[in-house]
Image (tube, rainbow, N blue to C red):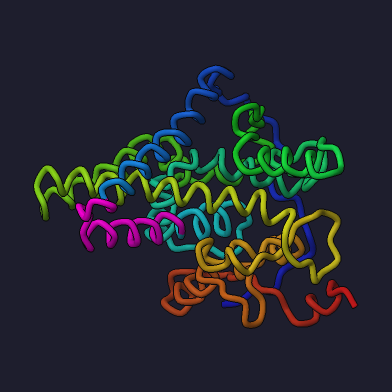
Amino acid sequence: MTAVIPAPAPEAATAPAAPAVTPTRRAQKAIMLAITVVPFVGVMVAVGLLWNSQVGPFDLALLAGGYVLCALGITVGFHRMLTHRAFVAQPALRAALLVFGSMAVQGRAIDWAIDHRAHHAHSDKEGDPHSPHAGFAAGLGGQVRGLVHAHVGWMFHHERLTDRGRWAKDLIDDPIVRFVDRTFVLWAVLGFALPAAAGALVGGWHGALTGLLWGGLVRVFIGHHVTWSVNSICHVFGRRPFAADDQSTNNWLLALPSLGESWHHNHHVFPSSASHGLGRQVDVSGACIAVFERLGLATDVRRVTAQQQARKRLT
């Protein structure tokens, strides 16, 4: 079943709830340093091993397979399904997407959705968690600082919204989402342990090490920077074919590695659409949702009509 996108509505209910327990600022900064520096070190080690011809096809297969699964967990699961409710997934698919998204180590599912809902509610204005524009001066220096902030800097001083009842009551009420959210650390650890175990089965201790590096650390490093590039690059560089009240852009260079997320301007104009790529624009995530729909695993899929596009398109 295909549903036409309805008129814009609040992304979440407004019922109050008790604030969630959040880490201290120092702990938050330590966590951010760990998830940015440790994968980077892993990339450096992995490149050194590759330079010495100590990495084989199996390691690269672990990287590619793990990247695609975890990226789909973010783009299809955390983003389009959870945050924007662009489609309804059957329970098994819903759980699998959320587990793979957790393995991407971009944070707990509900926290991720809250940050992104805040981004849309205040896009490129005060209150946007990672705008490269709001609060930065004009000129090259301001733009560079804004890009760095939007790419990674925002995580080091971001005050996470703690009113989960207002921003994510629909997610809190979902038992599958609650379970995966609470057990985030388990899935994050498994995201590293599984490729290490697979590597060990093939190549012993050396295989375990290279499996951990390529299927774990390198995968996370690439996934982080592709996602962060949508936050930064896709609000500065690219095309803007539709009328919008923010600075979001479409960037075709990132379309394939981001699995379609870099059609970011389209997404901001039509946020509830399951497909971000329109027409011939490559959108792997949108294509996967279409396959899930044909298999009966996804229903109520929201898409943009030609009439809706025409009303928003700039002349």
Instruction: Please indicate whether residue 155 sits to the left or right of residue 245 in the image.
Output: left
Does residue 70 show up magenta in the picture? yes
Quarter of the image with the N terminus in it: bottom right
Report whether 69 appears left or right of 33.
left
| Residue 299 in sight here | yes
Report the span colored magenta: 50-71
Which secondary structure class fits the magenta region best?
helix
Q: Going by the image, does 172 lie left or right of 38?
A: right
Q: How many marks?
A: 0
Q: Position of residue 233 (x, y in %)?
A: 67, 54
- In the rendered view of the protein, which quadrant contains the C terminus? bottom right
Return the x and y of residue 105 as percentages of the image width and height. 44, 42
Residue 179 percent coordinates (x, y): 41, 40
Residue 189 vertical placement versus 162 (above, below) = below
Decide: is 292 above or below 254.
below
Comparing 147 with 129, the one in front is: 147
In the rendered view, would you say 152 is above or below 257? above
What's the residue at 72%, 64% (across, down)? 238
Q: Which picture quadrant has residue 171?
A: top right
Q: Quadrant of residue 153?
A: top right
Seen as rendered, the residue at the extreme front is 52
Q: Position of residue 309 (x, y in %)?
A: 78, 76
**Is 86 in front, or is 218?**
218
